[in-house]
Image: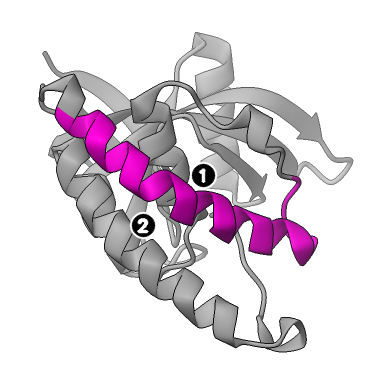
Amino acid sequence: MTYELPLFPLNTVLFPGMPLPLHVFEERYKKMVQVCLDEKRPFGVVLIRSGVAEGGPVAYPYEIGCAADIVEVQRLEDGRLLIMAVGQERFRIVALDHTLPYLVGKVEPLPLQPEPEEAIEYYVNELTPWLLEYLVFLADMGQVEFDPAQMPENNEDLVYLASAAIQLPPEEKQVILENEKATGILQDLIAKYREEVTLLRLKPKQDQGIFSLN
Protein backbone atom coordinates (compact mmCIF):
# COMPACT_ATOMS: atom_id res chain seq x y z
CA MET A 1 0.00 0.00 0.00
CA THR A 2 1.47 3.36 -1.04
CA TYR A 3 0.57 6.88 0.06
CA GLU A 4 1.74 10.45 -0.56
CA LEU A 5 3.97 12.12 1.98
CA PRO A 6 5.51 15.63 1.99
CA LEU A 7 9.27 15.24 2.41
CA PHE A 8 11.73 17.28 4.47
CA PRO A 9 15.34 16.52 3.41
CA LEU A 10 17.69 17.10 6.35
CA ASN A 11 21.25 16.35 7.44
CA THR A 12 19.94 14.05 10.14
CA VAL A 13 18.37 10.60 10.39
CA LEU A 14 15.13 10.14 12.33
CA PHE A 15 14.11 6.83 13.89
CA PRO A 16 10.61 5.68 14.89
CA GLY A 17 9.59 6.90 18.33
CA MET A 18 12.37 9.49 18.55
CA PRO A 19 11.79 13.26 19.00
CA LEU A 20 13.01 15.79 16.43
CA PRO A 21 13.00 19.54 17.20
CA LEU A 22 13.07 21.67 14.06
CA HIS A 23 13.50 25.37 13.31
CA VAL A 24 11.52 26.03 10.14
CA PHE A 25 12.25 29.32 8.37
CA GLU A 26 12.18 28.65 4.61
CA GLU A 27 8.88 29.56 2.98
CA ARG A 28 8.54 26.20 1.20
CA TYR A 29 8.82 24.27 4.44
CA LYS A 30 6.59 26.65 6.37
CA LYS A 31 3.97 25.92 3.70
CA MET A 32 4.62 22.20 4.01
CA VAL A 33 4.21 22.30 7.79
CA GLN A 34 0.97 24.26 7.47
CA VAL A 35 -0.42 21.69 5.02
CA CYS A 36 0.47 18.91 7.47
CA LEU A 37 -1.23 20.77 10.31
CA ASP A 38 -4.33 21.61 8.27
CA GLU A 39 -4.70 18.05 6.98
CA LYS A 40 -3.54 16.38 10.22
CA ARG A 41 -0.97 14.35 8.35
CA PRO A 42 2.70 13.51 8.90
CA PHE A 43 5.69 14.52 6.82
CA GLY A 44 8.70 12.42 5.94
CA VAL A 45 12.21 13.04 7.24
CA VAL A 46 14.85 11.90 4.74
CA LEU A 47 18.62 12.20 4.86
CA ILE A 48 20.11 14.35 2.11
CA ARG A 49 22.05 12.30 -0.43
CA SER A 50 23.12 15.34 -2.49
CA GLY A 51 22.38 19.06 -2.24
CA VAL A 52 21.89 21.30 0.78
CA ALA A 53 19.23 21.56 3.47
CA GLU A 54 18.55 25.28 3.10
CA GLY A 55 18.34 27.49 0.04
CA GLY A 56 18.77 26.52 -3.59
CA PRO A 57 17.09 23.58 -5.31
CA VAL A 58 15.38 20.92 -3.23
CA ALA A 59 17.98 18.39 -2.07
CA TYR A 60 17.93 14.81 -3.38
CA PRO A 61 17.25 12.32 -0.58
CA TYR A 62 18.04 8.73 0.28
CA GLU A 63 15.06 6.53 -0.54
CA ILE A 64 14.39 5.26 2.99
CA GLY A 65 13.19 7.67 5.67
CA CYS A 66 10.91 7.99 8.67
CA ALA A 67 7.46 9.58 8.87
CA ALA A 68 7.07 12.23 11.57
CA ASP A 69 4.01 13.57 13.37
CA ILE A 70 4.00 17.19 14.50
CA VAL A 71 3.19 17.26 18.22
CA GLU A 72 4.00 20.87 19.10
CA VAL A 73 4.24 24.16 17.19
CA GLN A 74 5.52 27.55 18.32
CA ARG A 75 4.94 30.44 15.90
CA LEU A 76 7.45 33.28 16.16
CA GLU A 77 6.60 36.90 15.35
CA ASP A 78 8.66 36.92 12.15
CA GLY A 79 6.85 33.85 10.76
CA ARG A 80 9.44 31.27 11.69
CA LEU A 81 8.24 28.05 13.30
CA LEU A 82 9.68 25.96 16.09
CA ILE A 83 8.18 22.49 15.90
CA MET A 84 8.58 19.24 17.74
CA ALA A 85 8.00 16.11 15.70
CA VAL A 86 8.11 12.46 16.69
CA GLY A 87 9.18 9.62 14.41
CA GLN A 88 6.51 7.13 13.36
CA GLU A 89 6.97 4.41 10.70
CA ARG A 90 9.84 3.82 8.29
CA PHE A 91 9.06 4.17 4.61
CA ARG A 92 10.61 3.63 1.21
CA ILE A 93 10.23 6.25 -1.54
CA VAL A 94 8.71 4.74 -4.67
CA ALA A 95 8.51 7.98 -6.70
CA LEU A 96 9.20 11.69 -6.25
CA ASP A 97 6.93 14.59 -7.23
CA HIS A 98 8.72 17.90 -7.89
CA THR A 99 5.65 19.96 -8.85
CA LEU A 100 5.33 21.75 -5.47
CA PRO A 101 7.92 24.03 -3.84
CA TYR A 102 8.80 21.09 -1.57
CA LEU A 103 9.26 17.41 -2.42
CA VAL A 104 6.35 15.00 -2.19
CA GLY A 105 7.04 11.29 -2.20
CA LYS A 106 4.91 8.35 -3.14
CA VAL A 107 6.00 6.00 -0.37
CA GLU A 108 5.35 2.54 1.00
CA PRO A 109 5.62 1.46 4.65
CA LEU A 110 8.80 -0.42 5.57
CA PRO A 111 8.21 -2.35 8.81
CA LEU A 112 10.91 -4.56 10.27
CA GLN A 113 10.78 -8.11 8.98
CA PRO A 114 9.22 -10.69 11.33
CA GLU A 115 11.80 -12.60 13.38
CA PRO A 116 11.68 -14.99 16.35
CA GLU A 117 11.27 -12.90 19.50
CA GLU A 118 13.81 -15.02 21.36
CA ALA A 119 16.49 -14.08 18.79
CA ILE A 120 15.73 -10.39 19.20
CA GLU A 121 15.67 -10.76 22.99
CA TYR A 122 19.09 -12.42 22.96
CA TYR A 123 20.72 -9.47 21.20
CA VAL A 124 18.77 -6.91 23.24
CA ASN A 125 20.23 -8.47 26.38
CA GLU A 126 23.72 -8.24 24.85
CA LEU A 127 23.27 -4.57 23.89
CA THR A 128 21.54 -3.21 26.98
CA PRO A 129 24.58 -3.01 29.34
CA TRP A 130 26.59 -1.14 26.70
CA LEU A 131 23.69 1.22 25.96
CA LEU A 132 23.15 1.95 29.66
CA GLU A 133 26.82 2.74 30.23
CA TYR A 134 26.89 4.99 27.16
CA LEU A 135 23.79 6.92 28.29
CA VAL A 136 25.31 7.36 31.75
CA PHE A 137 28.32 9.01 30.08
CA LEU A 138 25.94 11.38 28.27
CA ALA A 139 24.04 12.16 31.45
CA ASP A 140 27.26 12.80 33.41
CA MET A 141 28.27 15.35 30.76
CA GLY A 142 24.87 17.05 31.02
CA GLN A 143 23.92 16.20 27.43
CA VAL A 144 20.79 14.20 28.26
CA GLU A 145 18.48 13.60 31.17
CA PHE A 146 18.57 9.87 31.69
CA ASP A 147 16.72 7.67 34.14
CA PRO A 148 17.51 3.94 33.76
CA ALA A 149 14.00 3.17 35.01
CA GLN A 150 12.62 4.76 31.84
CA MET A 151 14.37 2.38 29.44
CA PRO A 152 11.86 1.02 26.89
CA GLU A 153 10.31 -2.32 27.74
CA ASN A 154 9.42 -2.99 24.10
CA ASN A 155 12.33 -4.47 22.14
CA GLU A 156 11.65 -2.51 18.95
CA ASP A 157 11.51 0.76 20.92
CA LEU A 158 14.86 -0.07 22.51
CA VAL A 159 16.36 -0.85 19.09
CA TYR A 160 15.42 2.59 17.82
CA LEU A 161 16.47 4.40 21.01
CA ALA A 162 19.89 2.78 20.76
CA SER A 163 20.07 3.67 17.06
CA ALA A 164 19.33 7.32 17.78
CA ALA A 165 21.50 7.72 20.88
CA ILE A 166 24.87 6.66 19.51
CA GLN A 167 27.13 9.34 18.05
CA LEU A 168 27.72 8.36 14.43
CA PRO A 169 27.92 10.19 11.08
CA PRO A 170 24.49 10.51 9.42
CA GLU A 171 25.49 8.15 6.63
CA GLU A 172 26.20 5.39 9.15
CA LYS A 173 22.89 6.01 10.88
CA GLN A 174 21.20 5.78 7.48
CA VAL A 175 22.65 2.30 7.07
CA ILE A 176 21.09 1.35 10.41
CA LEU A 177 17.73 2.84 9.40
CA GLU A 178 17.78 0.85 6.16
CA ASN A 179 18.39 -2.50 7.85
CA GLU A 180 15.17 -4.50 7.67
CA LYS A 181 15.94 -6.91 10.52
CA ALA A 182 16.03 -6.00 14.21
CA THR A 183 18.67 -8.67 14.82
CA GLY A 184 20.87 -7.16 12.13
CA ILE A 185 20.54 -3.68 13.66
CA LEU A 186 21.27 -5.04 17.12
CA GLN A 187 24.40 -6.92 16.04
CA ASP A 188 25.71 -3.77 14.35
CA LEU A 189 24.92 -1.64 17.40
CA ILE A 190 26.53 -4.06 19.84
CA ALA A 191 29.83 -3.73 17.95
CA LYS A 192 29.55 0.05 17.72
CA TYR A 193 28.59 0.56 21.38
CA ARG A 194 31.33 -1.76 22.58
CA GLU A 195 33.87 0.29 20.62
CA GLU A 196 32.50 3.67 21.76
CA VAL A 197 32.21 2.74 25.43
CA THR A 198 35.69 1.22 25.46
CA LEU A 199 37.10 4.49 24.11
CA LEU A 200 35.11 6.58 26.59
CA ARG A 201 36.42 4.54 29.50
CA LEU A 202 39.95 5.50 28.46
CA LYS A 203 39.34 9.24 28.17
CA PRO A 204 39.41 11.83 30.96
CA LYS A 205 35.97 13.42 31.39
CA GLN A 206 37.15 16.81 30.14
CA ASP A 207 38.20 15.23 26.82
CA GLN A 208 35.03 13.27 26.11
CA GLY A 209 33.46 15.77 23.74
CA ILE A 210 29.85 16.59 22.99
CA PHE A 211 27.14 14.07 22.22
CA SER A 212 23.70 14.35 20.64
CA LEU A 213 20.69 12.07 20.42
CA ASN A 214 20.11 13.19 16.80
Can you give x and y, in whole percent of width and height, for residue 19 in the image? 58, 37
Q: Amino acid at mark 2?
A: Val
Q: Based on the displayed image, in which of its 4 quarters is residue 203 positioned?
A: bottom right
Question: Magenta stretch: residue 6 in it?
Answer: no
Q: Is residue 198 above or below residue 189?
A: below
Alpha carbon of mark 2 to alpha carbon of mark 1: how far? 10 Å
Can you give x and y, in whole percent of width and height, for residue 88 in the image? 41, 25
Can you give x and y, in whole percent of width and height, for residue 111 in the image? 19, 25
Q: Is residue 31 above or below residue 61?
A: above
Give the left or right position of residue 208, taking residue 165 as reference: right
Q: Which residues are magenta?
A: 119-145
Give the left or right position of residue 174, taking residue 141 as reference: left
Question: Which residue occupies the foreground of this view, 64 or 172?
Answer: 172
Name the residue located 44 percent from the left edge and 62 percent from the top edge. 11
Q: Which mark is residue 28?
A: 1
Are discs 2 and 1 less than 8 Å apart at CB? yes
Q: Which residue is mark 2?
A: 58
